[in-house]
Image (tube, coloured by chain):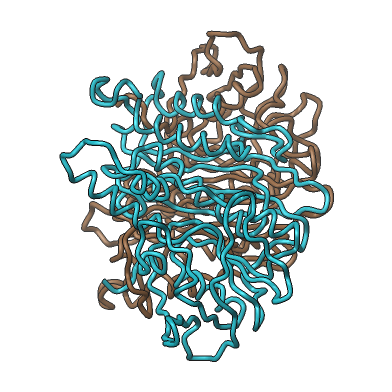
Chain colours: A brown, B cyan
Amino acid sequence: MGKKRAGAGGELGLIRQIRQRAGAGRRGSGLRLGIGDDCALLRPRDGEELAITTDLSIAGRHFRLDWHPPEAVGHRALARGLSDLAAMGARPVAAFLSLGVPRELTVAPDRARRGGKGSWVDGFLNGLFALAKAHGVPLAGGDLAESPVALADIVLVGAVPRGKALLRTGARVGDPVYVTGSLGGAAAGLKMVAKLNGSANSGPIPKEWRDAMSAQLRPEPRIPQGLALRRRGLATAAIDLSDGLSTDLAHLCEESGVSAIIQSELLPIAKSATLDQALNGGEDYELLFTARPKTLVPRSIDGVPITLIGYINEGVPDEPAVMIATGRVVAPLEARGWQHFSEP
Amino acid sequence: MGKKRAGAGGELGLIRQIRQRAGAGRRGSGLRLGIGDDCALLRPRDGEELAITTDLSIAGRHFRLDWHPPEAVGHRALARGLSDLAAMGARPVAAFLSLGVPRELTVAPDRARRGGKGSWVDGFLNGLFALAKAHGVPLAGGDLAESPVALADIVLVGAVPRGKALLRTGARVGDPVYVTGSLGGAAAGLKMVAKLNGSANSGPIPKEWRDAMSAQLRPEPRIPQGLALRRRGLATAAIDLSDGLSTDLAHLCEESGVSAIIQSELLPIAKSATLDQALNGGEDYELLFTARPKTLVPRSIDGVPITLIGYINEGVPDEPAVMIATGRVVAPLEARGWQHFSEP
């Protein structure tokens, strides 16, 4: 729209820097042409189809510049997309990043203040590339723009054998419902991050706090678990827990045309978390899945525990999709997880 | 991060509305599973690879809420991505939209003020879906968030026979350089949009103004031309003109390791545009391509004129990538097109 002279640094400099770091883990993934042309080119293997997801993270909505270190923002942005691939049982092929940032976040501040660590964008990219490397995902492209608010839209492309993806639609009456890992840790961690940020105390942080903060700042997408569920044919339906168990289980029920009942005593609540955080907190990025009643589901996959939390029931129109049993008391579980544009 | 009760409208209502409209043109495109699961699933045809591009549009940077009608913002967002597919010679398969908007843009304002036309988001989606329908592209997924600034990140996925995509890297010494359509119209149109916005005059708008404004508000991505160039084997390299001829030709030269000389008298300057707008204005979304010297390039493709504007020369390190000849005077053409984060 406007126009500016190309400077020595500027957008081209930043793109050059990203391009140099983008190749990590590129070999064999299916990426044929990465950053540098009008499009990237991906070549799935014979018999594969591609799974694609996009996730938008905006400062003040999905993260806070004063609470989340830039490395955590980069890690979380990529983790959200990888978690969607995990829920389909897809292997990651490539990521794309559209990054909008205020100009000052591209400039390294006072060395004294940030310990010579470079700009906010450098930190963001460090977090993103570290997780990308851990999962062997190359950055294949994206876009870059100056923006009044920091934001990142991440696109993940994965591959899965044709017709074999784990869908939300496959849950049937009688299927047990499972989750990976523990629930509520990310929400509990956010509270601690907020408390530490507002406190003058700089003493040692208790281990329980560190674990919960890590669940918030560096969630681990369950790619190996998703791949194992798909390859071993264990799951009938799956979804990742990004918005919170109450909301995401309702999504799965809606797409499968069923309802579910979960038992609150069975929930694997994270150590520092409350029941409310486990049900409605969101951002845990665990997998929720159903299996056939006779399927032998292992107690853990690749070191991550798998917990039975309830069962699938018939879907009844205009009835709540999810019920929760506490002892013998059964009540509707309202979807109270994350939603934008809802009534305040 | 935060948490809100799910309202009757809200995010789910908006997603439902988008999902209902998303299927247009879905059949046969290669989209196997659209909105409603953790990922969309795309199945390329045998022997095809996928081309993927992302384009971020932010209010105040890529469009202005007071200048660009919401329909134009939606059209332009999709057109940017389609134009990248055109430059690869790819057929469109699916689009993904990550939309961030302030809450008030999701609400229909006073009927009197907008003629009962619905919210800004409704207008945006009308513009986007109209162009999507014209090109048979289904909306396969995306994300939605409340944002302090309106923004749209669009992802386009296209398909192209393996190894046949038009790349930026194929230009060779002696290749003539061509452009589709005319140049500078979008930049000239922006000036007119701005003038009309600041003027109290509501009389009839001259045709020349309407044409230029249309180039700015409703650019036509050159999908049929890109497909024809690729299918008929006409082009050795291609790029779309999004940032401006001076910048985009320099990109193509850099990726091909060559330089170029263009003749200012040959440039197909849009009627109301200046030479500067044709060289540096950007947003024309025409295709720039090179061909082998002996290739017979048609004068038009599908009604859009094709114009020879110059030739490819050897690349010399530390010399300007693009020269411009005006009569017998030859001078370096500085890349003065759009760039973010450049020196002000």
Foreground: B186 or B119?
B186
Front-lying residue, A132 or A313: A132
Residue at 59% x, 57% y is: A95
Relative to the observer, which residue lies in front, B116 or A280? B116
Q: Is residue A252 left or right of residue A116?
A: right
Q: Position of residue B174 (x, y in %)?
A: 65, 82
Tell whether A173 sits left or right of B342. right
Picture quarter with the C terminus of chain B: bottom left
Where residue A275 sits, quadrant-wise, is: top left
Let me know if residue A177 appears in the view.
Answer: yes
- Percent of width and height locating residue B239: 57, 65
Determine the residue positioned at 48% across, 90% down.
B319
Rendered location of residue B282, percent (x, y): 42, 61
Identify the image quadrant of the N terminus of chain B.
top left
- Which residue is pictured at 35% across the width and 56% down the height? B272
Find residue A168 and report its image quarter. top right
Q: Residue at x 62, y 78 (%)?
A: B256
In the picture, measured across the screen, residue A239 lies left or right of residue A150, that is right
Residue A271, above or below A148: above
